[in-house]
Image (spheres, helix red, strand yellow):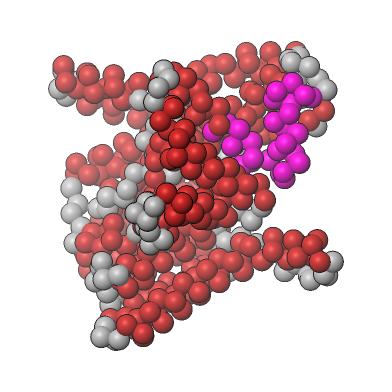
Amino acid sequence: MVFSSITFLYVFLPLVLVLYYVLPRRFQNFHILISGLIFYAWGEPFYVFTMILSTLIDYFAGLVMDRFDHSTKIRRAALIISIIMNFGLLGMFKYSGFIIQNLNNAFGFNIPDPGLPLPIGISFFTFQTLSYTIDLYRRNIKVQKNPVTFAAFVTLFPQIVAGPIVKYEDVANELEHRIHSLDMVYEGILKFITGLGKKVLIANNIGSLWTEVKAMPLDGVPSATAWLGILAFTFQIYFDFCGYSDMAVGLGKILGFNFPHNFDYPYLSKSISEFWRRWHITLGSWFRSYVYFPLGGSRKGTWRTVFNLAVVWLCTGIWHGARWNFILWGVLYGLVIIAEKLFLGKLLKKIPDILRSAYTLFLVILGWVLFDTADLPTAGEYIGVMFGFGQSGLYDGMSLYYLLNYGVVFIVCAIGSTDIIKRIADNIKKRWPGALGYSSVILQTAVLLLVTAYLVDATYNPFLYFNF
């Protein structure tokens, strides 16, 4: 994590929140700005200037659009400069090495790779700041002339490095006029602890299995172990990313912001299209608003819709990382979603829900192999092992060991990734209003104590989406 987990949870975070409420309202945005810069600079002491540069580019682009509101050419020029500069920074840090490597391989060049480290969360804050200039150009929002307020929007530390992607219009009013209440603080604390529990107690525990399996030579991995490994990652990435998003939404509520939710039980989906409406919701919303709809969406005929979907999913793959795995991952999802749009969706509606869910989970799990293996040959070999084309048979003693050792965690993951607990809680609330009040506090306190005990002794605590 950017901070050590203990430092963040028990030193930085309480200090930031206490100071936030002690300060007069007119200084709270400045406090958010400084806190965000410190939070980011702790892990990226040099590349914090990348975020500052991106902020300045879009702030001044906004002022130019407002100053020359009567001139379409100048407004368009300001937007183009904002887009080029932001994507230029993103391209330089995230994709330059990938492009150079492929040029060298394809044409025999000897261009040196600059080897630039990837600034944490650059894809998130780049999309976040671009939402401001694009919406301002469209006249969907008003210009923000206060540099502190605008910079506070960019540096909102709860979601600065891993989302959810908060568009300016989502929080424009709250940046100026936030409502603070004990109810929001209480709700935010419960949401934060829930997310913390998902990440630390579930994602970390199940993720250690995938780490072990992924490190094994594939010629020694039986099919059952390969399936257990990728199932572990399937749950790890969900509880890791969903957990962080819950933490961000919870902290936002404590600060007076209502960030958009990022997950809606995606593993309950009955099609790939539905899965991507439930997974990383804010990224899908961003691409719909700023890529799919401007290209025409589904309003210009079938083949134009197919083209627009293909562009969006190619961009989605590229957004996730500078590897052919990610690009193919995005392309394959795009092809499936296009097929569902054209004919497959109608066929799916004719089969039982359990088969639709099985179809969706099967494709999602195969997608995660592409997502988190080193390269395309490794992904292909891993999938081959899953379907019995390896050299180690169907299972061995280690497969049984993993199943027994992680069986309870798998059950917890399976239940936790559905809405079963939510439905039970909702029924209890209807029958006995207020019955969950004290029990929720007791449960969340227990979760916090368990998290503390885990973090004190933890050596494995990755945040997967910090890499994007």
Q: Is residue 418 above or below residue 165?
A: above
> Is 166 situated left or right of 405 in this image?
left
Q: Which residues are magenta?
A: 364-390
The verdict on residue 372 being magenta is yes
> Is 57 situated left or right of 112 in this image?
left
Which residue is located at x 75 percent, y 39 percent? 378
Q: Is residue 448 above or below residue 178?
A: above
> Is 405 situated left or right of 22 in this image?
right
Which residue is located at x 59 percent, y 37 percent? 367
Residue 179 at x, y = what percent? 18, 54
What secondary structure prevails in the magenta region? helix
Query: Is residue 156 visible in the rendered structure shown here?
Result: no
Q: Which of 322/40 is in front?
A: 322
Residue 442 at x, y = what percent? 31, 25
Q: Is residue 398 above or below residue 182?
A: above
Residue 423 at x, y = what percent? 29, 22
Query: Is residue 225 visible in the rendered structure shown here?
Result: yes
Which residue is located at x 28 percent, y 77 percent? 145
Q: Residue 421 is drawn in which quadrant? A: top left
